[in-house]
Image (spheres, grey):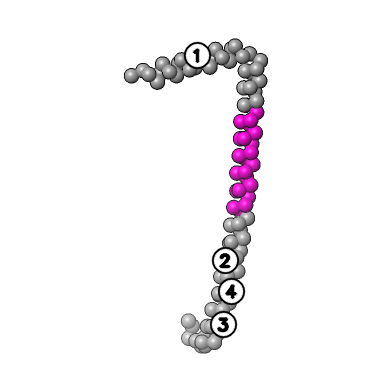
Amino acid sequence: MPKDQAAPSSDEIIAQMDVLRSDIAELSKSVSHLAKDRAGKARDAARDQAQTVADGAAQMSRQAEDAVRAQPLAATAIAAGLGFALGYLSNRR
């Protein structure tokens, strides 16, 4: 503190502390609102991605069902072949 300045009184220090407390409270509110906003945006983005994945899976399932209905014999042969191959690989030691 420069020599020509007087030391602040206790009332001035208390007033400055009150201002500081209110500034910190406002800053805390701002940070809280920002965090809530960003969390909401992240939640919405995750929900949109999950819906996109679910839609893609449903479409692939429909395509597989259509392929099985169109060629049931080929689908059965493929399923049997995969079953035999997996069974063979799992029993190998």
Residue range in magenta is: 38-59
The residue that appears at 65% across and 17% down in the rendered structure is 69
Which amino acid, mark 1?
A: Gly
Which amino acid, mark 2?
A: Ser
From the image, which quarter does the C terminus lie in?
top left
Badge 1 element: helix
Q: Can you give x and y, in whole percent of width and height, for residue 46 in the image?
A: 60, 44
Tell me the CA gap for discs 3 and 1.
83 Å
Q: Can you give x and y, in whole percent of width and height, for residue 56 in the image?
A: 63, 31
Badge 4 element: helix
The residue that appears at 58% across and 61% down in the rendered structure is 32
Q: Choose between 45 and 16: the one closer to the eye.
A: 45
Q: Quadrant of residue 68?
A: top right
The verdict on residue 93 being magenta is no
The mark found on residue 81 in the picture is: 1
Tell me the CA gap for discs 4 and 3.
11 Å
User: Can you say whether 55 is above or below 63 in the image?
Assistant: below
Q: Which residue is mark 4?
A: 22
The mark found on residue 28 in the picture is: 2
Contact flag, marks 4 and 1 (Cβ < 8 Å): no
The mark found on residue 90 in the picture is: none
Q: Quadrant of residue 78?
A: top right
Q: Which residue is mark 3?
A: 15
Which residue reaches farthest left?
93
Which amino acid, mark 4?
A: Ser
User: Can you say whether 43 is above or below 81 in the image?
Assistant: below
Q: Is residue 4 visible?
A: no
Tell me the CA gap for discs 4 and 1.
73 Å
> Which of label 3 and label 1 is nearer to you?
1
